[in-house]
Amino acid sequence: MTDVLKIERLTSRPQFLAAAKGVSQARGAVVVQRLDRADGDPVVRVGFTATRKVGGAVVRNRAKRRLREAARALVSDHGVPGSDYVLIARMGTAAREWPRLLDDVKSALTRLATAPAPSAGISGDTPPPARLNAARDTQSQDR
C-alpha cells in the first residue's frame, strides 16, 4: 500500500494571510500561493478563495467548487508535504475548460514545488518594480 498525502482545509483568516507571505504562481485561470510551514507535520493544508471581481455569488461558488475538485485530483501527487496552499480563482476560472484548468493548477503546483523560499520582506516570485523616475526625483530634491 502506498502512502497517501493527507490533505486538510485552511479555515481561518490568519492561515490564509500566512500563506500569502509565501511564494505564488499565476497560471491561466488560477493563482496558487504556497507557504512551507517547516513544522515537521507532513499534512498539506489547502484553502480556496474568490474575490467579488470574479463575479456574483453563483460564479464565485462555481469557481471554488472547480478549484476544490482540481486540488483533490492534483495536490496529493504534486503537493509538497508540510505546505499550505491557497488557490485563488481568477476571472475565467468558472468558465475555463476542465482540462485547461487542471493543466493550470498542475503547472502552478509543480513550479511551486521547486520554487525557493521568499527572501525577507518580499513575497511572490517576482522582484519589486523598479522606480521609473528615480533620476527626476533626485533632480527635484536638489531644488
Image (cartoon, rainbow, N blue to C red):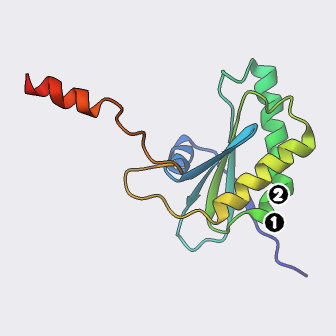
- Residue 95 lies, in percent from the top left, at 86, 29
Residue 125 horizontal/vertical position (percent)? 54, 51
Three-letter code for the amino acid on which mark 1 is drawn: Asp
Q: In the image, which disc is placed on residue 74?
A: 2
- Tell me if label 1 and label 2 are in contact, CB under 8 Å: yes
User: Separation of disc 1 and disc 2 at Cα?
Assistant: 6 Å
Q: Quadrant of the C terminus?
A: top left
The quadrant of the rendering that contains the N terminus is bottom right
What residue appears at the point 84 percent right and 39 percent down from the top-left corner? 66
For the residue pair 114 and 62, the one nearer the viewer reads as: 114
Q: Is residue 82 left or right of residue 76?
A: left
Q: Secondary structure at mark 2?
A: helix
- Percent x, y of residue 98: 91, 41
Residue shown at the point (91%, 45%) measured from the top left: 99
The residue that mark 1 highlights is 77
Label 2 crowd bin: few (<14), some (14–19), many (20+), radius 10 Å:
some
Vertical placement of residue 43 versus 93, above or below: below
> Is 90 rendered above or below residue 22?
above
Local crowd at mark 1 within 10 Å, few (<14), some, or many (≥20)?
some
Question: In the image, what residue type sits under mark 2?
Answer: Leu
